[in-house]
Image (cartoon, grey):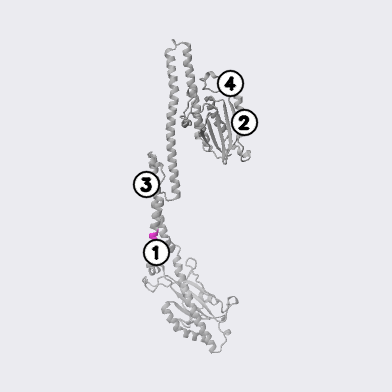
Amino acid sequence: MILQRHLSIRRILALVSLLFLLLPVGGIYFLRIYESALLRQTESELISQGAFVAAIYQHEIADRLTQQHLPVSRYGLPLAHAQRQKSNALSPIFPQLDLAKDPIHAARPQPEYTRDTLDPVASLAGTQIMPVLQEAQRVTLSGIKVLDYQGLVVAGAHEKGLSFAQVEEFQASRQGKPVSFLRARRMSDTSAALGSTSRNANINVFVALPITLQNRLIGVVWLNRTPMDLPQALFWKRYELGWTVLSLVVIAILIARLTSLSITRPIRALVEKTRLITQGDPQGQEPLHAPITREVAELSDNIAQMARTLQQRSAYIQNFTAHISHEFKTPLTAIQGSVELLQDNLAEMPPAQQQHFLNNIAQDTDRLGRLVSRLLELTRVDLMEKIDRSAQTADLRGVLHELVASQKDQSHANPVQDDLWPEGAGPAQDFQIQVHFEAPALGEQEAFRAAIAPDSLHAVLAHLIENSKQAGAQTMTLTVTPQANGVWLDVQDDGPGITPANQNAVFTPFFTTKRQQGGTGLGLSITQALLERYHGKITLLDSTTGAHFRLMLLSG
């Protein structure tokens, strides 16, 4: 039920693809990008048309002034010095209207009657260009008017002589600046069809361009056109838009398919792997054959490694539990048998025999105590995390010097009782340790430092010394050899050595050939586990005399 409440990755990818598909449409409607583009397209068209009309009107005025021998300096209005431009300089006019920023002004005001009279030169020039304007309007569908420098219409349908001097466009243009305005449109009750040349937008674009001659304002060309609205623009581009939408749909499907193949399927395969792991199926320990992506491959390898580690740990725990059960059951059975015999035959049993059974109980109890201590020690080592090689280091010279000194003190303070051991099997008296340092390739300060805590190194060597003593060795030789990335510590004794049959089992927990002498079989297991926590290693080497172990430690 909990899993059903969550969205699948496939559905999430489908939603993401849908959002990706809606991004262009969202940009059109919410950011009004396309509408602003249509607006500027209309503004650009009006600027182009106005530039041609201004050039024609300017040429007509110049001809009339020449024919009438009137100086240009006395015609029109002078422009401010800041607005003057060189006649040969390029002066492009760029569209700048933005539907999101520019205000929409009121509808175009009606022209006013005024007492001002048309200038004869301007009136004649307007009459001359009017046929040209009418012919152009049939194609461009733009509203075109030419105003003289007073704001009176000199060329315009049915409005000649009327004044537009009060409108904002003329007031701005008479300063010599081209301006563009957005004005509300007086709408009719019916809408034009999408394919019609008429447009349904509720705004009009107005452009006013000053007409100048020798830095004097001689008139203003005033144009307006309704821009195409979004539905009509999409209708005229319906085929291109259809192919675009179809392409986006195909791309979205391909993206969803690709992400499904590269993400969803590998994850489902990983889910199946985890199900196999929980069922104990060995196939769950194998990584994916086709993970596709690097991250999924890494995750698959880690899951497979985790499954193998858990399986090995489980097998280790099972075997370890069986060994513990066996090791504890043997002395407990012996203790129970001795107690039952003492309880049943204590009165008739001779004192020497009673003492024998009591000694057996004491030895088995002591063995159980040693087993518990070693098990606790092994547990503490197993629970340790691997140590950073730079966290703790040991000076091998100092550690081995202390080890030799402590061994000498133990030999003099605690002489060994040979009668507790069978002949040739027990620890020897005057056990000696010899230490040799090979010539280092580096300085001694760096060469003889190992990445291991001093007390842990003491514990490792203590286990090896104890094993040598129990085997009957009299001398142990420790040889330190610096390596490129670490230190080798060879531990070799002069005891009877390890038989070939037992060499592969020496690191197995509870394996011992000295069980009757109190051996627990955990010393080398603890040593191996402790070294692994410091990224070290212990190996058994072939030797003609005694046992030869090599400790490989990282440089400190």
Residue 166 visible, this angle: no
Label drawn at residue 415: 4
Identify which residue, 15 or 227, lies in the foreground. 15
Main secondary-structure element of the magenta-colored stretch = helix
Instruction: Choose the circle earlier in sequence order: 3 or 2.
Output: 3
Q: The magenta stretch spans which residues? A: 243-251
Question: At which x and y percent is residue 340?
Answer: 42, 16
**Of the residues shown, which amino acid type is indicated by label 1?**
Thr
Instruction: Choose the circle earlier in sequence order: 4 or 3.
Output: 3
Identify which residue, 489 or 413, lies in the foreground. 489
Farthest residue, direction bottom: 68
Q: Quadrant of residue 428?
A: top right
Mark 1 to mark 4 CA distance (whole Å)? 97 Å
Question: At which x and y percent is residue 313?
Answer: 44, 36
Instruction: Choose the circle earlier in sequence order: 1 or 3.
Output: 3
Question: Which label sits in the foreground, 1 or 3?
Answer: 1
The residue at which mark 3 appears reads as: 4
The residue at which mark 1 appears reads as: 244
Identify which residue, 546 or 550, lies in the foreground. 546
The residue at which mark 2 appears reads as: 401
Question: Which label sits in the foreground, 3 or 2?
Answer: 2
Mark 1, other Cα within 10 Å: few <14 / some 14–19 / many ≥20? few
Mark 2 to mark 4 CA distance (whole Å)? 22 Å
Q: Are marks 3 and 2 in contact (CB under 8 Å)?
A: no
**Of the residues shown, which amino acid type is indicated by label 3?**
Gln
Mark 2, other Cα within 10 Å: few <14 / some 14–19 / many ≥20? few
Callout count: 4
Q: Are marks 2 and 1 in contact (CB under 8 Å)?
A: no
Mark 4 to mark 3 CA distance (whole Å)? 74 Å
Question: Which label sits in the foreground, 2 or 1?
Answer: 2
- In the image, residue 518 above or below residue 111: above
Q: Is the C terminus in the top left, top right, bottom left or bottom right quadrant?
A: top right
